[in-house]
Amino acid sequence: MTAPLAEQLGRTAGMLRQIARAWTGATVIAPWLTPTDRRAAAVRLARRTLRTLGVRVHSRGAPPARGEPLLLVANHVSWLDVYVLNALLEARFVAKAETETWPLVGSITRGFDAIFIVRGSFRDAARVRGVVAAALGTGDRVVVFPEATTTDGGTLRRFHPALFQAAIDAGAPVLPVAIRYRRRDGSPAPEAAFIDDMTFAGSLARILRADALHAELVFGTVLASAGRTRRELAAIAREFVARALRLPATAMEPEARGRPPRFKRAG
């Protein structure tokens, strides 16, 4: 479904202004802000960006209370996921290292305290685990996409457990979140997916042309990390996301072998 041409042109002009405003904020203003003020600025940026793109956000479940350190873990469909999550909460994000090299986007992401990780590197995963644990220890909320890649929203890859260890190391709870995108009529919105060899510019163009995208978030139950292994936390979080998205078994990538999870709520 395609938006009217006049609406597409209006969104495009608005996004050019928004990108320029975001780049200025990230490179000129953000370095002078406190971490708390940078998080608040990132929330405002996310909400303005989504309004400009015509993306509406809906949520079920309770978003985390402010000030509570959490490791939030979600399935990954699009670069939009960062804006959708940030529109409802203040958090830092773990992003693939390639993002830092993208024109304009890299500067914006870096300016708002993203934590970059080299995908497929066990050594860098260990480094990032320490960075995330330290951030959780200071009271930050950190968002991780444990699939380590994006999907079209109709499948779910296995959740890599490495960064769940950061929550265990910091004694912080884990909150699973399911993300999906729909059109106005409720059908899946493939326009939102950022997959395969798609470029950021190509993905943005698809979203600008789309008619009325709706992002849906489902927040799960907070999971205590104490007494659990990282594989158990990953398995429980993934099971929640699959159930929230109502994915059939055929849409699930097989999990790595390990002990079955032990279910225990935080608190």
Image: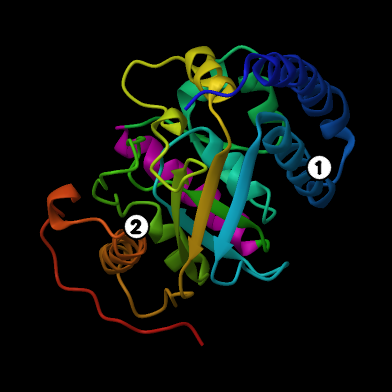
Q: Is residue 123 above or below residue 146?
A: above
Q: Which mark is residue 71?
A: none
Q: Position of residue 240 (x, y in %)?
A: 34, 66
Question: Residue at horizontal 46%, vertical 43%?
Answer: 181
Q: Is residue 1 left or right of residue 31?
A: left
Q: Amino acid at mark 1?
A: Ala
- The secondary element bearing badge 1 is classed as helix
Residue 262 appearing in the image:
yes
Q: Is residue 153 left or right of residue 252?
A: right
Q: Position of residue 158 (x, y in %)?
A: 24, 50
Residue 259 lies within the magenta run? no
Question: Residue at horizontal 30%, vertical 69%?
Answer: 236
- The secondary element bearing badge 2 is classed as helix
The mark total stands at 2
- The residue tagged 1 is 41
Relative to the observer, which residue lies in front, 45 or 101? Answer: 45
**Majority secondary structure of the magenta segment?**
helix
Mark 1 → mark 2, Cα distance in angstroms: 30 Å
Pointer 2 local density, CA inside 10 Å: few below 14, some 14–19, many at least 20: many
- The residue tagged 2 is 245
Mark toward the start of the polypeptide (1 vs 2):
1
Q: Position of residue 217 (x, y in %)?
A: 51, 56
Q: Position of residue 64 (x, y in %)?
A: 62, 68
Foreground mark, 1 or 2? 2
Q: Is residue 261 above or below residue 237?
A: below
Magenta residues span 120-137
Determine which quarter of the picture holds residue 47.
Answer: top right
Residue 92 appearing in the image:
no
Query: Residue furthest toward the bottom?
Result: 267
Q: Is residue 123 above or below residue 75?
A: above
Question: Residue at horizontal 37%, vertical 48%?
Answer: 146
Q: Amino acid at mark 2?
A: Leu
